[in-house]
Image (cartoon, coloured by chain):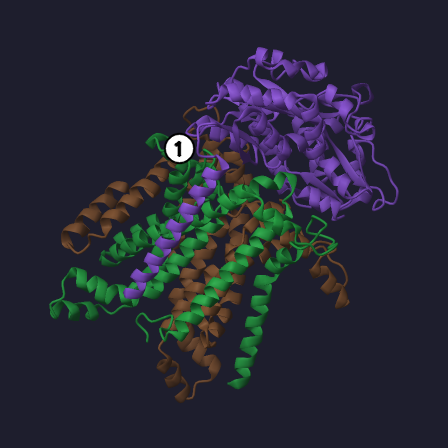
Chain colours: A brown, B green, C purple
């Protein structure tokens, strides 16, 4: 793979003298992407005692890890779906506000507060005596267990990823030519039809970028699986974390990482631009 | 149409309330004399005093800011170069391959990135500390900058550049007079995302730091065993208010000066 | 373009200013010179006043670095590239670090205060003759419970946790050895059992506990229990003391089937540069008065026998945290089971976590 890649680059450089920008970028890729990938692939062939083996790959195809992979994909799908459902209208209404750039910055800002602190705040808010339950009680629904459920896990994950979904969709909406919308309206299309036929298709690239930015990292979530889901949700990220830090079985951890990278490549291949 | 707008505003208000809810929760308890994030007892400034009497914590905050600003700047430059090079590569397969490589660091779990960087730095003989942390933050921020800048480039019409060439502009002039102004919003977005990644990161920094160098998130995580003191809440509150002030202040000034924020390409 | 250049110049200017401030701060705090001693410890696991006192007494400037798990700490030390003069790993990490040559032997002639330690805690299996390590704090694993939430019920044994009435009431600590150990103990097996049939039996027993388990969590378990998020928690004794200090409705018990006896220990890792200072620091912490002050600040049990004289009677006489060993069936120290067995424990634990109600 690396070889073909090198040839591509050489060809690209020869055809295109303009592309001097490749040099620093390729250097970065070689040092901080290619080298770590090689290291990880290398490690994935060693067992816990440092002997060469392919047992890690066999182990990945046992029910427990397959179930884990399935779980991760399912939750990542849910998180992406809800992020999109919430982020699209947010981005849309943001473009209609007066100080849109300022509001956009204010959407990103909460990300700068430490995640662990925010997770602790959620522990308080979702707890038995927390704010969320107080509201439920006020509404006459009564206390519910919110913490350590699928709901709280998906909620907090969506909370974390919202800015990463809003940003690309916002950019896509901004680039939209307003005259197109006007034209559609003039031709008698309803607001919904205009959205479905004109606005949404033209912002599809932003949606794709947002989904990539959410789906891919949510495959490997870890800390909040413990804090918010009480280890009820085990994702591939949790397993990698465990293997690297607790079991010290770097081989198995690396093997899962290899699968995560393959999954990412496939997703990008599927959603890549086909213009 | 009018009614639509009202609904939109209500929706936005709800989203903002939820986004800021945990932060206000943290702020509220930073004034709690009880010492925990539960059962508010009495109002106190004790935790704020503690922050200012802890020079080590202040050093850590400055370290965090320096790393974030420097790494965001450098990775923005690298990322713009990367986006340009991807843009110039014509073949689709090569393009996708580059993009895949670009995204590897976004998908990889932090622990793996941290562990492999640690091995890398040891092989390269780089002493753990400021330099190693800075290098890794640059490394994992580059791809997000590329992802932010690339769409802007793709949206630029190629005739614009051809026209500039026809008018006798050289490479450098095309870059600085045509391309960069056009993609400025993307560059700023990339810079802010890089800043976000750097401020947010714990796992990678944890692996590659050493020799007394520490950042805020590493400090917070390692304090978790004994329970996080409310002085961390107080510190976060201060930093948060400071950033809001900075952003709003900058925005107001740039509005007054007549230079609108999204100048590049649109206005 | 001009705006771009201006913005970047502004950012660089701010960075330079910050770097200057940090340099001045570092200088005024004395972190810049050669007279430093780096202590690598758990977060907030020492009385900061003692560090100040140590600095005044010896002239070394202490850099206090923190870690959040033994494994991460070992990864750092194994890799080198950074200086740690004193570290505080748990006992199971010590046998591993010893095996991999990550520790320097201690010079007992420089540690005269060793004599104050309780002999029960010296010369243990993980470090015979205390060649490499000196105990810092010790404790047990047990059950914290809120008898008010349980209607006045008292818990005394691990098997009490399997009671059908306790649905969704238990928080477990996220540790494979702790949770597997609890199941093994409840079946009257050893914590260090390596018999596969026994381990599988323990795993099956754990699966049947699932309906009672509300969550498996980390350090936040203290906060959750103090806030009465659940009635029962399986925790380390040090954490238990902290929880009880915060909410006095809670009680702690070391189950009668037996439990784990753990130690955090001071060692000198191979990355040490200031070996003289490291010995001084360890000896300083072994001083009975300092050990007593530290135990009061941290709230864990000190292994320093002489230090107990300087501490409040009600603390020292508390059987929950300073038990005499005859009252408990069996207290075992974790043995180093080898990487393969440890991986097996972790895998069973992972399967238990994935077991659905």
Q: Chain of mark 1?
A: B
SS at mark 1 in the image? helix
Nearest to the observer: residue C130 or residue A253: C130
Q: Residues within 10 Å of mark 1 (few under 14, many from 20)?
A: some
Nearest to the observer: residue C164 or residue C176: C176
Residue placed furthest toward the right: C152
Query: Residue A25 at what x, y percent from top left?
Result: 28, 49
Is residue B111 found left or right of C257 in the rendered image? left
Q: Quadrant of the C terminus of chain B?
A: bottom left
Is residue C2 found left or right of B242 in the rendered image? left
Q: Residue at x 36, y 70 (%)?
A: B262
Task: Confirm whether residue A157 shows in the render.
Answer: no
Q: Is residue A232 above or below residue C237?
A: below
Nearest to the observer: residue A170 or residue B136: B136
Which image quarter: residue B21?
bottom right
Q: Is residue B30 above or below residue B135?
A: below
Query: Residue C357 at what x, y percent from top left?
Result: 69, 46
Query: Residue A76 at what x, y percent from top left?
Result: 51, 54
Query: Residue C45 at what x, y percent from top left?
Result: 63, 33
Q: Which residue is mark 1?
A: B119
The mark tally for this picture is 1
Is residue A69 found left or right of C4 in the rendered image? right
Q: Is residue A31 above or below residue B81?
A: above
Which image quarter: residue C181?
top right
């Amino acid at each position: 793979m690396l070889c073909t890649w090198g040839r591509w680059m050489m060809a690209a450089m020869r055809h295109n003298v303009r592309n001097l920008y490749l040099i620093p970028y390729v250097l970065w890729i070689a040092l901080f992407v290619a080298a770590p990938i090689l290291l990880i692939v290398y490690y994935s062939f060693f067992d816990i005692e440092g002997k060469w083996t392919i047992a890690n790959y066999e182990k990945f195809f046992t029910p427990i890890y397959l179930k884990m992979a399935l779980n991760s994909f399912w939750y990542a799908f849910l998180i992406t779906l809800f992020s999109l459902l919430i982020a699209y209208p947010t981005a849309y209404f943001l473009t209609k506000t007066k100080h849109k750039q300022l509001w956009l910055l204010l959407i990103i800002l909460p990300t700068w507060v430490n995640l662990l602190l925010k997770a602790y705040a959620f522990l308080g808010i979702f707890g038995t005596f927390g704010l969320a339950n107080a509201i439920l009680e006020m509404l006459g629904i009564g206390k519910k267990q919110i913490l350590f459920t699928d709901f709280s896990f998906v909620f907090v994950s969506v909370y974390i990823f919202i800015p990463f979904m809003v940003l690309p969709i916002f950019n896509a909406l901004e680039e939209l030519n307003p005259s197109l919308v006007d034209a559609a309206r003039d031709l008698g299309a309803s607001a919904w039809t205009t959205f479905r036929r004109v606005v949404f298709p033209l912002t599809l690239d932003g949606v794709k970028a947002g989904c990539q930015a959410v789906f891919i990292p949510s495959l490997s979530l870890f800390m909040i699986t413990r804090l918010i889901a009480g280890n009820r949700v085990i994702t591939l990220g949790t397993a990698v974390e465990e293997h690297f830090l607790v079991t010290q079985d770097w081989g198995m951890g690396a093997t899962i990482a290899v699968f995560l990278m393959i999954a990412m490549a496939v997703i990008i291949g599927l959603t890549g631009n086909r213009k | 149409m009018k009614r639509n707008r009202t609904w939109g505003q209500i929706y936005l208000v709800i989203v903002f309330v939820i986004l800021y809810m945990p932060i206000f929760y943290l702020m509220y308890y930073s004034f709690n004399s009880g010492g925990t994030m539960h059962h508010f007892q009495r109002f106190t400034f004790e935790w704020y005093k503690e922050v200012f009497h802890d020079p080590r914590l202040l050093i850590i905050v400055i370290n965090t800011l320096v790393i974030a600003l420097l790494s965001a700047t450098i990775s923005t430059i690298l990322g713009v170069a990367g986006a340009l090079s991807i843009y110039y590569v014509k073949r689709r397969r090569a393009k996708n391959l580059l993009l895949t490589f670009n995204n590897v660091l976004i998908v990889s779990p932090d622990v793996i990135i941290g562990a492999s960087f640690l091995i890398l730095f040891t092989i390269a003989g780089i002493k753990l500390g400021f330099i190693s942390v800075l290098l890794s933050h640059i490394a994992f921020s580059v791809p997000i900058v590329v992802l932010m800048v690339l769409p802007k480039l793709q949206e630029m019409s190629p005739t614009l550049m051809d026209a500039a060439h026809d008018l006798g502009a050289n490479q450098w002039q095309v870059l600085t007079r045509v391309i960069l102004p056009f993609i400025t919003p993307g560059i700023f977005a990339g810079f802010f995302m890089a800043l976000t990644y750097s401020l947010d990161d714990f796992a990678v920094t944890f692996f590659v730091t050493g020799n007394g160098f520490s950042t805020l998130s590493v400090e917070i995580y390692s304090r978790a065993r004994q329970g996080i003191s409310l002085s961390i809440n107080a510190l976060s509150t201060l930093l948060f208010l400071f950033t809001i002030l900075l952003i709003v202040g900058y925005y107001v000034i740039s509005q007054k000066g007549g230079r609108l924020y999204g100048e590049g390409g649109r206005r | 373009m001009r705006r771009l250049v201006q913005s970047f110049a502004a950012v660089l200017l701010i960075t330079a200013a910050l770097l200057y401030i940090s340099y001045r701060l570092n200088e005024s705090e004395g972190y810049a010179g050669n007279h430093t001693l780096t202590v690598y410890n758990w977060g907030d696991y020492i009385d900061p006043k003692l560090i100040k006192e140590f600095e005044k007494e010896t002239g070394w400037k202490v850099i206090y670095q923190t870690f959040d798990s033994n494994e991460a700490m070992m990864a750092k030390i194994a890799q080198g590239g950074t200086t740690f003069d004193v570290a505080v790993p748990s006992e199971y990490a010590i046998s591993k670090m010893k095996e991999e040559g990550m520790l320097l032997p201690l010079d007992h002639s420089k540690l005269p205060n060793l004599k104050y330690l309780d002999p029960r805690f010296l010369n243990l299996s993980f470090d015979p003759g205390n060649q490499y390590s000196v105990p810092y704090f010790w404790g047990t694993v047990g059950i914290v419970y809120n008898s008010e939430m349980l209607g006045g019920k008292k818990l005394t044994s691990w098997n009490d946790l399997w009671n059908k009435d306790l649905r969704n009431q238990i928080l477990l600590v996220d540790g494979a050895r702790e949770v597997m150990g609890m199941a093994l103990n409840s079946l009257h097996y050893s914590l260090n059992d390596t018999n596969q049939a026994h381990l599988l039996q323990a795993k099956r027993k754990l699966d049947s506990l699932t309906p009672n388990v509300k969550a498996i969590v980390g350090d936040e378990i203290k906060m959750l229990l103090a806030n009465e998020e659940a009635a029962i928690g399986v925790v380390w004794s040090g954490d238990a003391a902290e929880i009880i200090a915060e909410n006095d409705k809670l009680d702690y018990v070391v189950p009668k089937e037996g439990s784990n006896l753990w130690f955090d220990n001071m060692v000198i890792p191979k990355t040490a540069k200031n070996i003289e200072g490291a010995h001084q620091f360890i000896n300083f912490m072994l001083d009975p008065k300092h050990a007593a002050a530290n135990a009061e600040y941290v709230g864990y049990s000190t292994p320093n026998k002489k230090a107990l004289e300087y501490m409040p009677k009600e603390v020292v006489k508390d059987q929950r945290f300073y038990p005499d060993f005859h009252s408990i069936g069996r207290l075992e120290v974790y043995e180093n089971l080898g990487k393969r067995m440890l991986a097996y424990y972790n895998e069973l634990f992972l399967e238990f976590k994935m077991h659905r109600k």
